[in-house]
Amino acid sequence: MKYSSDKIKTVGFFGQHGSGKTQLAEALLYKAGVTDRLGRPDQGTSILDFAKEEQDRKATLNLKVGYLEHDGVLLNLIDTPGFMDFWGDIASASRAIELGVIVVDATAGVGPVTEKAYTALTERKIPILFFINKIKSEKANLQNVFDELKNTFDKEIIYLTSPDDAKWILDSDSEFKEKLIEAIAETEDELTEKYLEGEEFTTEEIQKGLQNLLKQGKVLPLMFGDALSDFGIDEFLKRLIELTPNVQSDSDKVVAFCFKSTADPHVGQIRFVKVLSGTIKQGDTLWNANEQADEKINQIFMVCGKNRQEVPEIVAGQIGALVKLKVTKTNHTICSKDGIEPLEPIKFPEPQEKTAIIPKTRKDEEKVMEGLTRLQEEDPSFKFYFDTESQQTIIVTMGDMHLDVILSKLKARFGVDITTQRPKIHYRETFKRTTSAEGKYKRQTGGRGQYGHTIIRFEPLPRGSGFEFTDTIKGGIIPARFIPAVEKGLREAMKKGPLAGYPTTDIKATLYDGSFHEVDSSDIAFQIAAAMAFRKAAETADPTLLEPIMEVEVVVPEEVMGDVMGDLNSRRGKILNTERIGRYCKIKAHVPEAELYKYSATLNSLTGGRGTYTAKFSHYDEVPKEIQKKIIEERQREKEESK
């Protein structure tokens, strides 16, 4: 199975869940004879959607790779999920393709993933072709789809096939043919001149002009069909072969990029690589430019969904699955050892939704961490960590569905059951009033005793100041050797504030008086005396609770901006400013972290899935009194339950 790089092309399928991306890919595989029957994701017979969680949900949840041969060309296919929660795989796919096919459901129109995929592919300057699917459905409404496409993308629509019979426009005499010829003529000066002089374009000029048309991205090129009923698929496959560019490789040096990792119970971690130049052969030793280490190439596979075929080599343009690699992971560049720099990494989205996870049995804690580590290699768009303050394991995902899939994989692959709970907020305590307090520790038990005596002034500081300690002791009334012990005692006492046991911050403590005993005074005595002074001061310093405030940026369609702002206000948010970005608006606000739990679900509901948000820590601020009371009561219940 040897291929020439000029005969290898890669296409990615993008679009909203339910648009029929996977069904379209299945139709192409069936048409090319890769499968002997048309796979149906909705019936669990898809060669691409083979994972159990996908068959259960009847939805693509992971990036999939396939390939077919047609007219002497090897065409790689990459299928992507249709949910925003799995945007990481969509980003990965965009690094391995030469053409992006955005599939639009003729019965449903443009969705949020449609829009975002278009933007992402455009930013990477990847040619885009729209395929309007399900046109044979009784619910198809092409006029609505055309209007929505025009309003969403504000570009001229060009038909490559007829919306009536899905035949090639240039083979007909319809009004759409002339419009396409005009669009082709505008891609190059020579073609423009030839068009104005009334000359016919050659077949080669038309094909080159169409490729330029897609590359320049000035119009929306549409093709039509129905993947389930095999309508328009022959024409679509033929034009994919013609219109998809191939990798431009002018070097024999090996350069390949790992764009996706996955796991297999039999062969372990699989690294999917796109070869950009040169040839990778079994037995080669290549250079990992990221890790600055050698990488031995063992087995190489070509993958089509759940099927793998071992091959001796892969060349520029091919996608291969490499196994048993020691250092290479997603985002790594493997190459000839010739000073080649690592390629630009995939920019994975920052997850926002925090959830605390607890294994149902304590003995599974280690397996959970191991499982999450392995799963993160496959999906870098989620994070996890152990929160030492709350003693919770926190997983940060793109949303509820993302979380559900990760937990189901943990159970299926690693045999652990997980329960979830709300992450605990890192509240803080502080003093609002200046006060002084005395702490005297005196103990006599026979022999040498213990004696420490401090008088300390406590003052509130501005938010974010932390803790300041100073002393104004004069005349040696407390020897200098005991001063550090006073500070240490205060810092230890401040770890558990007087209201609810949260750390105390933003105060200044000044040791200005006290006394000592020549024999009985010690570091430990002054530590205890300082802690006593702190606890006594809390009685008159008007202690209060502080909560973390997040700086939130929400990007939503303009028409729902009012609803989203109203919801933020209901979460005790403070709107800082708004900014218009095309058809969207960006809202910046300060919102208490406690009010953002499960926010993505609400945002999806308010915006029809078109809203996105990011949140980062901004500062601490005082909790309203009525809420403080609830927090303190809840904290007290937790203490009693843990006894």
Image: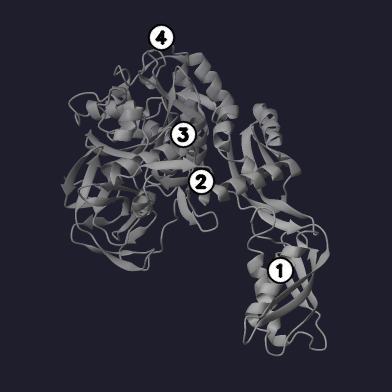
Mark positioned earlier in the residue sequence (2 or 1): 2
Residue located beneath label 2 in the image: 351
For label 4, the crowd category at 10 Å Cα-Cα, with few meaning under 14, some 14 to 19 and many 20 or more, is few
In three-dimensional space, the C-alpha distance between marks 2 and 1, rounded to whole angstroms, equals 44 Å
Question: Callout 4, which amino acid?
Answer: Glu
Instruction: Please identify, in this view, whether the residue under mark 3 or under mark 2 is nearer the observer.
Output: 2
The answer to whether residue 499 is left or right of residue 342 is: right
Q: Label 3 to label 2, Cα distance in Å?
A: 47 Å
Quick one: label 3 or label 2, which is nearer the N terminus? 3
At horizontal 33% and vertical 26% (from top left) the residue drawn is 24
Q: Secondary structure at mark 3?
A: helix
- Which type of secondary structure does the marked residue at label 4 adopt? loop
Label drawn at residue 532: 1
Q: Nearer the viewer, residue 420 or 529?
A: 529
Image coordinates of residue 227 in percent, x first then y, are 33, 21
Residue 99 on image: x %, y %? 39, 38
Left or right: where 216 falls relative to 336: right
